[in-house]
Image (spheres, rainbow, N blue to C red):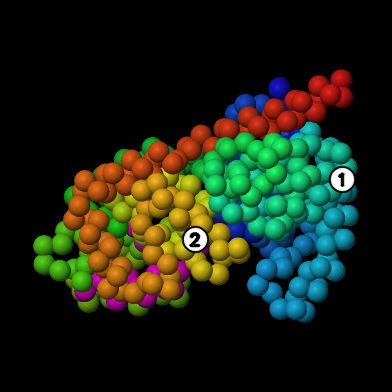
């Protein structure tokens, strides 16, 4: 399909925005004359990242309901009719051939407005267990793309395609030694990468801070690249220094492709995009799911990767410094097991997920065009 008009709705966090941008790039690679429009909120991460990537961007007024007070939920509910009407007007102006919902509370009003307006829609579900909103939207979507095979059992079987979760192309192709040097790390030491998202993860930071003494035992040729978030950086850096364990401690890592390339073992949360990145890059991991994620998504995502042998799962309720240190030591002292985990992770990965999703979008748009002609 040479020309297509695609509207992409969703955002809020990098876990939704980066896959959306990866998919947009894949569509452009296939249909260079494609017209793309992103719809998000003025306060989400998409408001900064989408225009910076060069794509047109419009906003609707909508708020999430999960984890809010009764008053906040009431206010958010009262905004829904307005969000639906704003979505309807945006779609009428842009006249997309297909609308993609990538998650986040902004996707609901846009996809529903598109479906009720008779426009082809594709819903992308990242997680192993879909939330209520996506289960409802899946009943009106033209097609549903899923990131994980496990999601199939929870969605209508009418039109489900396993695409995987799109990840950024700039994560690939980074040489290990050069990446380590770029962060000021040794080229030769076994390297841990620890991160917890854009704000860090306090429980992970605390556990690592207290585990460093055990990890810095004589003969341990370890080094750590640790993204803590702003609030914990000084305390974590001081703990590494006191234990004389070589570490680079930063609030946030922009160059995640190089960070992954530098790592022999990753310790992190289990958001859908993070799990997809680990698998696509073949990185063994210790996953500590965030226990308060909606519908316990992270635990299910982590369990899916761990079941195939690509990760070790530690529930936050079980997390303590001694257990974390023991799990890390067991893995870094067993290169054969680490290599097996890397292969298992890679076997679960879909590095071409953005291309698969782009193909599905163009197929759905093309089918609609043929029906109208």
Kindly indicate the quadrant of the structure image that contains residue 190. Answer: bottom left
Q: Is residue 185 left or right of residue 99?
A: left
Q: Is residue 53 left or right of 39 when viewed as pictured?
A: left
Quadrant position of the C terminus in the picture: top right
In the image, residue 142 above or below residue 338: above
Q: Which mark is residue 285?
A: none
Disc 2 marks which residue? 299
Is residue 201 a member of the stretch shown in magenta? yes
Residue 230 visible to an observer of this rendering: yes
- Toward which corner of the image does residue 325 lie, by quadrant? bottom left
* Within-10-Å neighbours for mark 2: few <14, some 14–19, many 20+: many
- Which residue lies at the image location 84% right of the left edge and 48% below the top edge? 113
Task: State the residue at coordinates (70%, 52%).
Answer: 135
Using the image as rendered, state which of residue 373 and residue 228 is in the foreground: 373
Q: Is residue 186 visible?
A: no
Of residues 31 and 312, the one drawn nearer to the viewer in this rendering: 312
Crowding at mark 1 (Cα within 10 Å: few <14, some 14-19, many 20+): few
What residue range appears in magenta?
193-213
> Could you say whether the residue bearing mark 1 is in a helix, strand or loop?
helix
Relative to 29, is 200 on the left or the right?
Answer: left
Q: Earlier in the sequence, mark 1 or mark 2?
A: 1
Question: Is residue 125 within the magenta segment?
Answer: no
What residue does disc 1 label? 116
- Label 2: element kind: helix
Q: CA distance from mark 1 to mark 2?
A: 34 Å
What residue sits 58% from the left and 38% below the top? 162
* Numbered-mark total: 2
Image spot of residue 194 (x, y percent): 36, 61
Query: For the N terminus, which image quadrant?
Result: top right
Picture coordinates of residue 171, whole percent (x, y): 44, 43
Q: Position of residue 121 (x, y in %)?
A: 76, 40
């Amino acid at each position: 399909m040479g020309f297509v008009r695609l509207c992409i709705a969703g955002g809020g966090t990098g876990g939704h925005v980066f896959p959306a941008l990866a998919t947009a790039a894949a569509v452009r690679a296939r249909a260079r004359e494609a017209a793309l429009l992103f719809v998000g909120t003025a306060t989400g991460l998409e408001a900064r990242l989408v225009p910076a990537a060069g794509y047109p961007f419009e906003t609707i007024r909508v708020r999430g309901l999960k984890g809010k007070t009764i008053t906040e939920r009431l206010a958010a509910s009262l905004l829904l009719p307005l969000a639906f009407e704003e979505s309807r007007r945006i779609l009428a102006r842009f006249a997309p051939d297909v609308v993609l919902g990538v998650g986040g509370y902004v996707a609901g009003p846009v996809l529903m407005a598109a479906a009720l307006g008779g426009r082809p829609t594709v819903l992308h579900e990242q997680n192993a267990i879909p939330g209520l909103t996506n289960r409802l939207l899946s009943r009106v979507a033209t097609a549903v793309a899923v990131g994980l095979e496990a999601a199939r059992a929870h969605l209508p079987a009418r039109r489900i395609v396993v695409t995987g979760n799109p990840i950024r192309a700039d994560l690939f192709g980074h040489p290990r030694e050069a990446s380590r040097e770029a962060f000021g790390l040794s080229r030769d030491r076994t390297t841990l990468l620890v991160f917890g998202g854009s704000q860090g993860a306090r429980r992970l930071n605390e556990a690592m801070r207290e585990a460093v003494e055990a990890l810095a035992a004589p003969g341990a040729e370890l080094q750590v690249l640790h993204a803590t978030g702003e609030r914990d950086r000084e305390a974590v850096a001081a703990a590494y220094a006191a234990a004389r364990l070589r570490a680079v401690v930063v609030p946030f890592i922009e160059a995640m492709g190089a960070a992954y390339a530098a790592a022999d073992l990753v310790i992190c949360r289990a958001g859908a995009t993070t799990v997809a990145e680990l698998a696509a890059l073949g990185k063994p991991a210790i996953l500590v799911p965030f226990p308060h994620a909606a519908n316990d998504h992270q635990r299910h995502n982590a369990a899916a990767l761990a079941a195939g042998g690509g990760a070790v799962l530690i529930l936050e309720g079980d997390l303590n410094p001694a257990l974390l240190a023991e799990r890390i030591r067991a893995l870094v002292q067993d290169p054969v097991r680490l290599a097996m985990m890397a292969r298992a992770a890679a076997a679960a990965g879909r590095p071409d997920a953005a291309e698969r999703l782009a193909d599905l979008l163009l197929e759905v748009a093309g089918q609609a065009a043929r029906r109208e002609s």
